[in-house]
Image: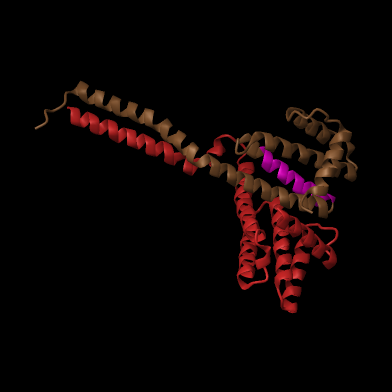
Chain colours: A brown, B red
């Protein structure tokens, strides 16, 4: 028969149990991120591709209010993903930068030049962070024109 | 004394490993609630995320094999995709997302119009697609423009 444990022995056992749990929990968490991170990234990329594709259709085919609405929905989605660190930050940064340029162009057509300028500044900041050497407004216009020629349609 | 110690250590180690592994599975999207204070924004994000994963997943599956659209199986996949998009659209309160889903529905209807051999069915899908594009604010939703658009879009998809 096992002898009964004394009170200090029982407390020691509880402490050992808590310690074992505390050591194992981060290991389990780490194993989870290793196992599921690629899947999470893939899903996020899929979601980004879906909303970007549909927003670009709107940007190319719809009237100004609808183009603006689609681009703002895309921007809002990408910025939240960025805040939550749900995707590769470099590629998100570039997509957000392109979205700002497109928004700037939409506002320019709508006649809101102040808002357009503000979007251009935000785009320039993003391209600067991405390491683009030439982020002048004229160059960004060229970039977006080229990207739009080769995009979905 | 040795036996209970080993039992407690191994039990707590396994419990810690399992808890550490399982908790993120349930909280990956929703733990964000603590990171983003504006819960409406987060709700919109999660909804858009889920709808877009489903849409793009179906798109990749369908467009990777555009030659099957005309077959019964291919049309079945398109009809299923359309049903999913329409149920998502009726479920959302987010107008921006609703409009994007209108475009998604229109694109699938356009493909169904092209895939349908029967003239009446094809016409019905085309008209539905035009209604969706019109509601989504498109400036040109004429039949020649839409046929040209879909041809260029999927020709590019096939090249990929």
Is B125 placed above or below A76 here? below
Q: In the rendered view of the protein, which quadrant contains the N terminus of chain B?
A: top left
Q: Is residue B51 left or right of residue A116?
A: left
Q: Is residue B152 visible?
A: yes
Q: Nearer the viewer, residue B78 or B156?
A: B156
Q: Position of residue A87 (x, y in %)?
A: 62, 38
Q: At 34% from the left edge and 37% from the top edge, which residue is drawn? A: B15
Q: Position of residue B73 (x, y in %)?
A: 60, 70
The stretch drawn in magenta includes residue A110 = no
Q: Is residue A144 left or right of residue A15?
A: right
Q: At 30% from the left edge and 29% from the top edge, which residue is drawn? A: A17
Q: How many marks?
A: 0
Q: Is residue A34 left or right of residue A49?
A: left
Q: Nearer the viewer, residue A79 or B121?
A: B121
Q: Main secondary structure of the magenta part?
A: helix
Q: Is residue A62 visible?
A: no
Magenta part of the chain: A64-79
Given the current orientation, which residue lies at the most extreme front position?
B159
Given the current orientation, which residue lies at the most extreme top position?
A8
Q: Position of residue A144 (x, y in %)?
A: 82, 41
Residue A131 quadrant: top right
Q: Position of residue A55 (x, y in %)?
A: 74, 50
The stretch drawn in magenta includes residue A70 = yes
Q: At 23% from the left edge and 29% from the top edge, which residue is drawn? A: B5
Is A47 placed above or below B123 here? above
Q: Nearer the viewer, residue B74 or B4?
A: B74
Residue B126 quadrant: bottom right
């Amino acid at each position: 028969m096992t002898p009964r444990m004394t009170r200090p022995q029982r407390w020691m056992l509880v402490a050992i149990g808590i310690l074992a749990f505390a050591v194992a929990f981060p290991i389990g968490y780490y194993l989870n991120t290793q196992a599921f991170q690629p899947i999470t990234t893939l899903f996020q990329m899929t979601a980004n591709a879906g909303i970007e594709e549909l927003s670009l259709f709107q940007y190319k085919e719809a009237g100004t209010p609808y183009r603006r609405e689609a681009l703002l929905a895309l921007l809002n989605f990408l910025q939240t993903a960025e805040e939550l660190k749900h995707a590769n930050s470099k590629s998100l940064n570039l997509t957000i930068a392109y979205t700002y340029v497109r928004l700037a162009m939409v506002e320019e057509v709508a006649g809101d030049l102040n808002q357009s300028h503000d979007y251009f500044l935000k785009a320039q900041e993003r391209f600067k962070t991405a390491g683009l050497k030439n982020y002048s407004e004229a160059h960004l216009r060229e970039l977006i024109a080229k990207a739009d020629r080769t995009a979905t349609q | 004394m040795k036996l209970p110690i080993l039992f407690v250590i191994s039990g707590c180690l396994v419990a810690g490993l399992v808890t550490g592994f399982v908790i993120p599975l349930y909280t990956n999207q929703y733990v964000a609630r603590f990171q983003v204070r504006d819960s409406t924004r987060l709700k919109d994000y999660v909804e858009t995320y889920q709808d877009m994963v489903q849409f793009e997943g179906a798109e990749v599956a369908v467009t990777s094999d555009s030659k099957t659209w005309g077959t019964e199986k291919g049309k079945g996949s398109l009809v299923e995709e359309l049903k999913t998009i329409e149920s998502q659209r009726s479920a959302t309160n987010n107008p921006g997302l609703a409009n994007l889903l209108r475009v998604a529905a229109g694109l699938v209807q356009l493909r169904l119009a092209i895939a349908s051999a029967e003239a009446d069915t094809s016409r019905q899908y085309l008209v539905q697609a035009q209604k969706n594009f019109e509601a989504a604010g498109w400036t040109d939703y004429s039949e020649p423009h839409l046929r040209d658009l879909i041809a260029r879009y999927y020709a590019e998809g096939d090249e990929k």
